[in-house]
């Protein structure tokens, strides 16, 4: 769409207090950048909202002019659903207000808040919730898809902590959703993604934690990966809820932390998080640290908020990313062999393969309580290729490595975490839910968004 073709935004401006950014705006190219540098879309309008009324006004204007819409919170989604070509971006990235009530142990966070904002404010009172693995991920996208993180075995998923939402619906209305207000909508928002409306405010319940916890990375050379993965399987089968262990496979970066002889060679690490007393964690995590012949052990008492930023440097804004993912049961010997074979062929020094461990509190929530399925699964594996913007000529090779790895694990798949879908979102979205959940979600979509206005996502189509 050219500037001449675009509808005038004068009518929008009369009912909008935020900033309206169009292609002729000097900040347009900066404002349309998101985390994944692979995404290059050109919206007609970026409506940089300041509150729910701005969101409603921009949405109504877009619908009046028959323009597609997308919703941007943290802008961290791999597939770039937060941007739409020739449409209107409902941009909440400036709405980052985060307020803790220590008396009720709750936090209210606006739709553009990042994990880092929630962590920082909650930790001021020694409180926390499950808020992802990367601090610059948006709390909205994380939560609407389910919300896995370091603390999920102790505190449940982000959706398990969610107590209420303020939502702008497809017709521009502003409603509340909770167990007592629009409970059907509240059920769908907890795992159904952005299919039912724009959540402008979240209220979560917090739990005591820290501020100092025991956490860090233990790493081994790739030759020990089969042993480490088998240990992960067995150890996590009956580990206490306080234990979070995430495996991560990659090439060793050229950092002083790692022996120079390992730089550029495949390694496996376990990122440990103990959500309990440090002294107790020292005892419980001792078998992890004593396993095999580790080349690195950074496990130590540290502020929880610091630990939450530990993985940030591995996935900075602006790099190009491509991934595919499976939900898995226990790591069988066949699965371990497949993982190790593909670790040996990793195509980029920037690529990573995190394996997340489930169980504990998140697994004890009834599957019909929320729209998050497969709570009895053991792991999620996310095969992440990454390369620099100037390495575009190598992109096909990196994508091929992801697809080959993904295809090799397909016989063991138990579905997919909806937040980990990518270019396969529309073909795999049904795999992200149980059959009962899928039908309930489609019925809910029909009630709240019959015209499928919110389709820039892992889309759940309305019935008919």
Image: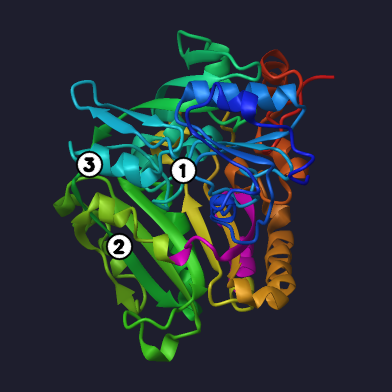
Q: Can residue 248 be seen in this view?
A: yes
Report whether 61 appears left or right of 369.
right
Classify the position of the C terminus by image quarter.
top right
| Residue at the limit of the structure toward the top, as seen here | 180
Residue at the spot of label 3: 123
In the structure shown, which secondary structural element does the residue marked by tag 1 occupy? loop
397 to 162, vertically: above or below: below
Asked whether 464 falls inside the magenta stretch, the response is: no
Q: Which residue is drawn at 73% across and 54% down?
A: 411
Whole-percent x and y of residue 132?
Answer: 42, 46
- Of badges 1 and 3, the one in the foreground is 1
Q: Earlier in the sequence, mark 1 or mark 3?
A: 3
Q: Residue at x 55, y 42 (%)?
A: 377
Q: Residue 113 or 305: which is nearer the viewer?
A: 113
* Residue 42 vertical position relative to residue 161 in the rendered view, above or below: below
Q: Quick check: is 324 in the magenta stretch?
A: yes
Using the image as rendered, state which of residue 386 and residue 401 is in the foreground: 386
Q: As rendered, which of 48 and 342 lies closer to the eye?
A: 48
Residue at 41% x, 43% y is 114
* 83 up-or-down from 63: above or below: below
Whether pointer 2 and pointer 3 mark residues with C-beta atoms closer than 8 Å, the reply is no
Write down the residue under mark 1.
138
Q: Distance between the residues labelled 2 and 3?
A: 18 Å
């Amino acid at each position: 769409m050219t500037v001449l073709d675009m509808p005038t935004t004068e009518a929008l401006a009369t009912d909008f207090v935020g900033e309206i950014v169009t292609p002729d705006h000097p900040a347009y190219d900066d404002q349309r950048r998101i985390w994944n540098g692979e995404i290059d879309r050109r919206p007609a309008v970026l409506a940089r909202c300041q509150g729910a009324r701005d969101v409603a006004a921009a949405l109504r204007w877009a619908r009046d002019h028959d323009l597609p819409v997308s919703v941007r919170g943290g802008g961290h989604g791999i597939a770039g659903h937060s941007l739409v070509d020739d449409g209107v971006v409902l941009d909440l990235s400036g709405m980052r207000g985060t307020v803790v009530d220590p008396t009720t142990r709750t936090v209210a966070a606006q739709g553009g808040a990042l994990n880092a904002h929630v962590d920082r404010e909650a930790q001021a009172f020694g409180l926390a919730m499950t808020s992802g693995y990367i601090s610059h991920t948006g709390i909205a996208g994380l939560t609407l898809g389910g919300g896995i993180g370091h603390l999920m075995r102790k505190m449940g998923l982000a959706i398990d902590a969610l107590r209420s939402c303020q939502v702008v619906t497809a017709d521009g209305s502003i409603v509340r959703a909770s167990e007592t207000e629009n409970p059907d909508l509240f059920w769908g928002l907890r795992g159904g993604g952005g299919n039912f409306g724009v959540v402008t405010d979240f209220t979560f319940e917090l739990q005591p934690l820290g501020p100092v916890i025991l956490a860090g990375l233990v790493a081994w050379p790739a030759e020990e990966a089969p042993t480490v993965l088998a240990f992960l399987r067995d150890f996590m089968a009956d580990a206490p809820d306080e234990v979070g262990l995430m495996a991560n496979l990659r090439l060793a970066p050229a950092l002083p932390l790692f022996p120079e002889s390992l730089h550029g060679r495949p390694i496996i690490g376990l990122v440990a998080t103990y959500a309990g007393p440090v002294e107790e964690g020292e005892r419980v995590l001792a078998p992890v640290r004593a396993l095999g012949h580790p080349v690195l052990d950074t496990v130590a008492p540290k502020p929880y908020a610091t630990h939450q930023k530990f993985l940030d440097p591995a996935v900075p804004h602006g790099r190009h990313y491509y991934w595919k993912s499976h939900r898995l049961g226990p790591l069988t010997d066949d699965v371990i062999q497949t993982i190790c074979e593909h670790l040996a062929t990793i195509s980029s020094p920037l690529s990573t393969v995190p394996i997340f461990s489930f169980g504990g509190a998140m697994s004890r929530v009834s599957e019909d309580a929320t729209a998050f399925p497969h709570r009895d699964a053991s792991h999620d594996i996310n095969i992440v290729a990454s390369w620099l913007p100037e390495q575009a000529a190598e992109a096909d090779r990196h994508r091929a490595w992801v697809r080959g790895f993904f295809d090799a694990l397909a016989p063991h798949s138990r579905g997919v975490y909806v937040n980990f879908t990518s270019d396969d979102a529309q073909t795999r979205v049904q795999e992200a839910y149980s059959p009962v959940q899928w039908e309930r979600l489609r019925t809910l979509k029909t009630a709240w968004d019959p015209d499928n206005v919110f389709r820039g996502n892992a889309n759940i189509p309305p019935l008919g």
